[in-house]
Image (cartoon, rainbow, N blue to C red):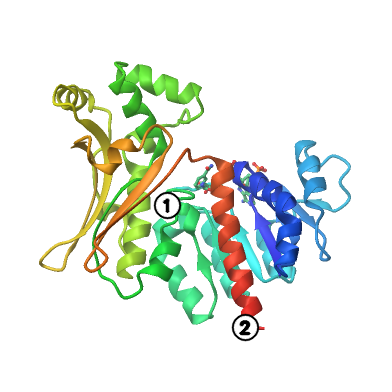
Amino acid sequence: MKIQLIGLGNVGKNLLKLLSEEEEKLKDRGLDLRFVSISDSKGTAVNENGLKLSEVLKYKELEWHNCTYYFKGYSAIDAIKNISSDIVVELTPSTINGEPGLSHIKEAFTHKKHVVTANKGPLVVSFKKLKDMALENNLYFLYEATVAAHVPIFCLLSSCFITDEILKVEGIFNATTNFIICEMEQGFSFQEALDKAIKAGWAETNYADDVDGIDAARKVVILANTIYDSDFKLDDVKIEGIRNVEPLIMEAKKQGKRVKLLCEIAKEGSGNVFLQVSPKVISQDNPFSTVNYGDMAVKFYFKNSQEIFVSAKFVSPRQTAQAVLNDIIKVALNKKCQG
Ligand SMILES: NC(=O)c1ccc[n+]([C@@H]2O[C@H](COP(=O)([O-])OP(=O)(O)OC[C@H]3O[C@@H](n4cnc5c(N)ncnc54)[C@H](OP(=O)(O)O)[C@@H]3O)[C@@H](O)[C@H]2O)c1
């Protein structure tokens, strides 16, 4: 299986590390995953027989100095167009207009390549178009890591609950806000908790998307579109962030309760789908009250299977990379079955 990787940042590097570690296990399963090109923002490393991943990681640390197979200015789009492969793994930054990931994914589908991504941007901007392109070309489009990183959400829905009806979904999908709220519960002000989150690496200096609930709302859009095969946009989500959450936390604490920035997707009696991100007071016996700091969780309310709660500890680029690798393996195993 020939793979092209676009984006060699936190997640991309962890993906290569994981693959180097798991190479023998994958070979034992009959899986030969070969990276034929790896692109970053400045160029592309190419070896059509398969790049040596540990060597690529070393060269990336050295800014590709003396690397004979890295071509500066050779873009990811050129690589998708010109290099033969089966899967494009898209790991560039999530942006408001979806670029450059959106163009990469469209180009991949145009050249009949499967796509695995952790990048929310393109899915929020153009979910239906991308899904349709994948479907028309009979290609996989897997994006498990886009919502709650390594919490298994889409694989659970696609393999375990195919005929069951989803009545409601709740989730904690943003680690930065969860971290800040947990610190505020310990008595810190919003600003102090935010500073701690930045120092600990949970929040970026450009933290507005997180604290204003936008990042969580993007994940709501992707999940709702997947569940209801629809084309919701960010504007369809009712969003309230956590900048003014202090009084709610004080009130909740008096009652022995907690506050969480909860994502909600619910089908109303009228058939309309209600999408919301907002701080909610929850009691101690609510399973979300056990989701602390960098943890994430989801709860599905099914018509037949009833309530299913899944949580995962400490979201980090390594766990995100594992979710990306799981998607790659899923494509490889299915292709192998098809011969
Ligand atoms: N970090 C997590 O745990 C996590 C969790 C869930 C989802 N995600 C998503 O996963 C994606 C990757 O995250 P990350 O933390 O790895 O990001 P990152 O560290 O910022 O890395 C982004 C990579 O994309 C490359 N890039 C940027 N523009 C490009 C272009 N036009 N062509 C080719 N490559 C380009 C960058 O190149 P340079 O190296 O040259 O700058 C860099 O290697 C993001 O969409 C993020 O939202 C991340």
SS of the residue under disc 1: loop
Q: Is residue 31 left or right of residue 215?
A: right
Quadrant of the rendered structure where residue 5 is? bottom right
Q: Which mark is residue 249?
A: none
Q: Residue at x 59, y 43 (%)?
A: 318
SS of the residue under disc 2: loop
- Provide residue 238's location: percent of width, then percent of height: 22, 48
Q: Is residue 150 left or right of residue 291?
A: right
Instruction: Report the label total.
Output: 2
Q: Is residue 8 visible?
A: no
Quadrant of the rendered structure where residue 307 is? bottom left
Q: Which mark is residue 338?
A: 2
Q: Is residue 214 left or right of residue 303?
A: right
Q: Residue at x 71, y 62 (%)?
A: 26
**Considering the image in quadrants, where does the C terminus appear?**
bottom right
Q: Amino acid at mark 1?
A: Val
Mark 1 neighbour density, 10 Å: few (under 14) some (14–19) many (20 or more): many
Q: Nearer the viewer, mark 2 or mark 1?
A: 2
Q: Amino acid at mark 2?
A: Gln
In the image, 39 versus 201, the foreground residue is 201
Q: Residue at x 22, y 34 (%)?
A: 284
Mark 2 neighbour density, 10 Å: few (under 14) some (14–19) many (20 or more): few
**Residue identified by numbered label 1:** 147
**Considering the image in quadrants, where does the N terminus appear?**
bottom right
- Provide residue 137's location: percent of width, then percent of height: 53, 80
In the image, 99 versus 319, the foreground residue is 319
